[in-house]
Image (cartoon, rainbow, N blue to C red):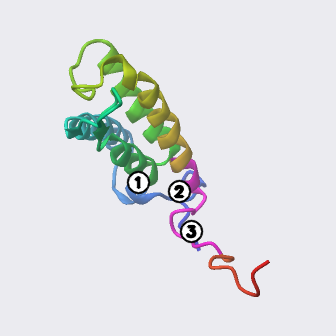
Amino acid sequence: MANISAAGRSAVLTDLLPGARVRDAGLVVGAALLTGLAAQVSVPLPGTPVPMTLQTLAALLAGASLGPVRAFLGLALYFALGQVGVPWFAPDGGNATLGYIVGFVVAATVVGALAVRGGDRTRCARWPPSGPAR
């Protein structure tokens, strides 16, 4: 059974921390900082201008642990600060990574919405499929 917070929605991991506004602001800034640090771990891939980074892990982790609103705000802050000049996008990616960063904002929000619904705490009842293969 999912834990229900005071706001009437399923709790995600960070809802278990005390405080509300200061906690939420700190978590949003922390998600942006974590994603910015994860972008610095960059491995160039031959044949493509887009490097492999740990940004994907940071974005999905933010969504699963913060929920949809805070994850959206954290990744949107990361995106906005990068656009105004904070040098924390992947160092070798250039403008080729802009679409990925927008995708990280969307992915964090979707994963957060799934986490609030308990998708991070349940397993699919039909996997592995039972019965004869069709």
Q: Is the stretch drawn in magenta largely helix, strand or loop? A: loop
Residue 42 vertical placement versus 120 (above, below): above
Q: Nearer the viewer, residue 54 or 108?
A: 54
Q: Mark 1 belongs to which amino acid? A: Ser
Question: Which residue is disc 3 drawn over?
Answer: 2
Q: Which mark is residue 115?
A: 2
Residue 90 vertical placement versus 107 (above, below): above
Q: Which mark is residue 130?
A: none
Marked residue nearer the N-terminal end (1 or 2)? 1
Could you tell me residue 55's position as x and y percent?
A: 33, 40
How far apart are the two marked residues, 3 and 2, measured between alpha carbons?
Answer: 10 Å
Task: Provide the residue span drawn in magenta.
Answer: 112-124
The residue at 50%/41% (across/down) is 107
The residue at 21%/21% (across/down) is 87
Marked residue nearer the N-terminal end (3 or 2)? 3
Could you tell me residue 21's position as x and y percent?
A: 38, 39
Q: Is residue 122 magenta?
A: yes
How far apart are the two marked residues, 1 and 2, measured between alpha carbons?
Answer: 8 Å
The residue at 75%/81% (across/down) is 133
**Snapshot quadrant of residue 37:** top left
